[in-house]
Amino acid sequence: MVSGLPIVTPASFVLSRTGKLYYSNSGLRGGGAEAALAVELINVAQTPRQDLLAKLWYGLDAKDLGNGEYAGLQVNLDGFDIIAHNYQAAPDINVGAGALLPSPGPWEFIIPRRSELVITGLCSDTDNQRYAVLIAYPV
């Protein structure tokens, strides 16, 4: 904990000490032979009672992502995908150990009050870890 606020908060929004923004951080999720192709990173069952302008950063530890494999993310609000983005490794590239593939972001979108928000990290190689960091401001 830094300044009394939790760092990793995948199941909730945390209101900053100033009360001017919310955040959620998935921490690194997935990886290992048992990991799924789609890993739920953030799942907030009910967002705050106000509309929010959100910024999302997504990244992937792409140590084994090779020719033809893909990575991506999905953002779902109240059962509807509002962002679905995939990118594929180039035919002549094996990304290699320790590489980090950020998405073209940050992604910005509106979160209506009292919505269900689910952010899922996608990767065809299950050995890779993914993360999402979301900040949101009342509008």
Image (cartoon, helix red, strand yellow):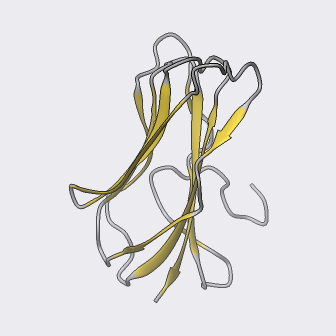
- Would you identify the image quadrant in which residue 51 lies? bottom left
Q: Residue furthest front?
A: 92
Q: Nearer the viewer, residue 69 or 39?
A: 69
Q: Residue furthest top?
A: 33
Estimate the x, y position of residue 107 in percent, counting from the top left. 52, 63
Residue 83 rendering spot, x and y as whole percentages: 37, 56
Q: Going 63% across and 17% down the picture, which residue do you hit?
A: 64
Residue drawn at 35 percent across, 81 percent down: 49
76 displayed left or right of 64: left
- Residue shown at 50% from the left, 49% from the top: 10
Q: Residue furthest left?
A: 79
Front-lying residue, 56 or 99? 99
Q: Position of residue 46 (x, y in %)?
A: 32, 65
Q: Is residue 45 left or right of residue 134?
A: left
Q: Is residue 51 above or below residue 117?
A: below
- Between residues 78 and 107, which one lies in front from this camera angle? 107
**Left or right placement of residue 60 versus residue 86 in this view:** right
